[in-house]
Image (cartoon, grey):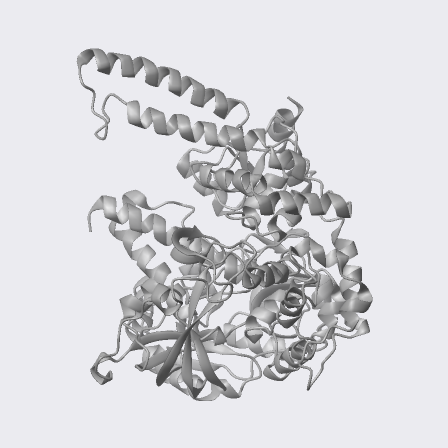
Amino acid sequence: MTPAEAQQRIAQLRADVARHDERYYRQAKPEITDFAYDGLKRELAELEAEFPLFATADSPTQRVGDDRVQGFREVAHRQKMLSLDNTYSEEEVRAFHTRMVRLLGTEDLHYTVEPKIDGLAVSLTYEQGRFVRAVTRGTGDKGDDVTANVRTIASLPRELKKVRGTVMPDVVEIRGEIYLTAAEFERINAERAAAGEELYANPRNTAAGTIKQLDAAEVARRKLSIVLYSLGHCEPAVVTTQARLHERLKAWGLPHVERIWHALGIDEVWASIGELDALRRSFAYGTDGAVVKLDDMALQREVGATDKAPRWAIAYKYKPDTARTRLKAITIQVGKTGILSPVAELEPVFLAGSTIARATLHNEEEIRRKDIRVGDLVEIEKAGEVIPAVLRSFPEERLPGAPEFDLPAAVGHKCPVCGGKIAKLAVADEEAQGVAWKCQNYDCSAQRTGRLGFFCSRKALAIDGVGGVVAEKLVELGHVQDPPDLYDVAQETLATLNLGTAEKPRVFGEKNAAKVVAAREAARALPLEKWLYALSVPDVGETTARELGRRHRNFTELADSALLRAVLQKAGLAAERELQAPSSRKNPAKSDEDRARRKELCVRLDAEIAGLDAGPLAGVPSDIGPAVAASVVEFFASVPGKRLLAKLQQLGIDPQGTVVAAGVFTGKTFVLTGTLPTMKREEAEQKILAAGGKVSGSVSKKTSYVLAGAEAGSKLDKARELGVPVIDETEFQRLLGR
């Protein structure tokens, strides 16, 4: 691979990993298995190692995934909360032991082997034995305060039991995982099925989504569980080994893992991993691997950690469960943006605790790459209990004459739902990435149903109960054309909505209808960014909607946005400059006179671009690029866009943007580390945002300032290494006052 090819592949991998991180950590809706995700990160790490010129401090391989969402107060961890390095290889587990021997100078190393729990990581703080706080891992340095929601977990004691002859820590951070039992997950899905709502995919994602709800009463209805297994900050220290920590957790009365293994040397470690694999399916929580840790905490400190993971631990992940079955047919689903997605219809097969009859095939290119044809014997995977995927086919067992799959031919070159035109287009949204076939009819009923369900989803306007079959019925019966039409549907109509058939009616019900009406009224007060995201404007994801909401007062201003016009103007100037450059290969200069003229023209174009950057585009992030600008401008100038704006005006809904005026920190990015003398971290962040700046969780060459306080961590070292200015609270106040 050439350096140029490596740079391009690295950029693509970083974009893919970032998208999957967003879906896993923030949306709790992963679209690929852990095995596939780990493969992407491994390839990225290997390329960065082979081509160090393209390695950066903000690469996904160098940081902890970010699970923070809006609506929760951020709290700093006293001790950084790291993730774990993963492997699927016995060879790499043994290589881990070899590294420990080399670092510590002895073969006589004791380990613990523990279940790797498939839940949501959380850190609990107990002060003087009393539970005071629960915080998600977040960026590792700080996370979301979910204390109110964690208090609903019945198995978690509010006070630690006193242990005779031992000291109770003044302050202790205890780490673990929040999860849903299989029985509770099935109960929740049964309720959703009865209400006509979309079913949740798996217990892990449901637990993650539940703990991030803003309504603690709703969290309490879903009986979350917790298991604890590691230590963060502890003052004073009370244990010296990982094994004794598990004993102390049990003595304190905390939920703990059923069993850990003590192992001397790598052979005993590998044997323990095998024993755990034989037992893990009997545990109350889901497990997907084994965590190997140095037992002695003094040795753990000696070995240390990277910014992302401890060096003294490694997670061995078990191979995903797979099964073979026959592919009976390939059907096509149409999503909210019109993307046509192929789905495998399978001969039912039992896999990982359930019967599988359907699996995702992702897109047409994936089917061709794997050479999958109807009638084939295929292998399917269900790792982490996400939607099953087809891994491969077995061409050697294929029936003669089986044709290659041709998506447009399979649907008769038209949308299978509305019969409208389809086209192959580049896409980059939550449904797909790359090139996909799309239905061109915005008013396709499948798209209407998808947009309505998304409009009401928790990530959008949080109008619970209007998803799946409910959205489908509202569209089918003509009650809703565009999502805001939901406001015209009377409560009585909702209550009597038949989600079943004429022979077997199943009504939505008065109680559910009342909830929808209350939720839709509450959504009126949500800001512009939420409404913009909820309306499924093409190319506008959650982050982009937030940035646009910070820079526009309302939809009227956004629809005729001077900022977006400036973005498009800059893109046009940049394209013209590239074309007119004296050294252009596409458009070479014809003479010395032409070359001189082009130089003058490029100087003028550079000045115009600089003027835009210093003026209307000052501080505008890369999320708002020419593709987004064109998409938003075109959408609100289109018939459907104008129809949506008119409907909102008719309903009296005028969401307001959280416009931040230009200030002394416009265009500046800050990273905070350590404890400030007089100012809380949250207060400093609010001051930065109010002055037009941005706050980041990691230091890079693009960082403007690192604001450092007492006990500053590795971010301070990184800032010095990169030459990023480091300021204290006094200098920060001086800059702010200026």
Q: Is residue 340 above or below residue 383?
A: above
Provide residue 695's location: percent of width, then percent of height: 57, 40
Q: Is residue 124 above or below residue 735?
A: below
Q: Is residue 48 above or below residue 84?
A: above
Point 27% across, 71% down: residue: 404
Q: Nearer the viewer, residue 355 or 357?
A: 357
Image quadrant occupied by the C terminus: top right
**Figure quadrant of residue 494:** bottom right
Provide residue 24's location: percent of width, then percent of height: 51, 62
Q: Nearer the viewer, residue 149 or 124?
A: 149
Provide residue 726's location: percent of width, then percent of height: 51, 33
Would you say residue 27 is visible in this rendering?
A: yes
Provide residue 613's location: percent of width, then percent of height: 48, 25
Point 67% across, 43% down: residue: 645
Would you say residue 235 is visible in this rendering?
A: no
Residue 132 vs residue 291: left or right? right
Numbered disc total: 0
Residue 27 vs residue 490: left or right? left
Q: Nearer the viewer, residue 561 or 284?
A: 561
**Residue that protrudes farthest toward the left in the picture:** 591
**Figure quadrant of residue 267:** bottom left
Point 23% across, 15% down: residue: 595
Point 59% across, 60% down: residue: 448
Q: Nearer the viewer, residue 429 or 164?
A: 429
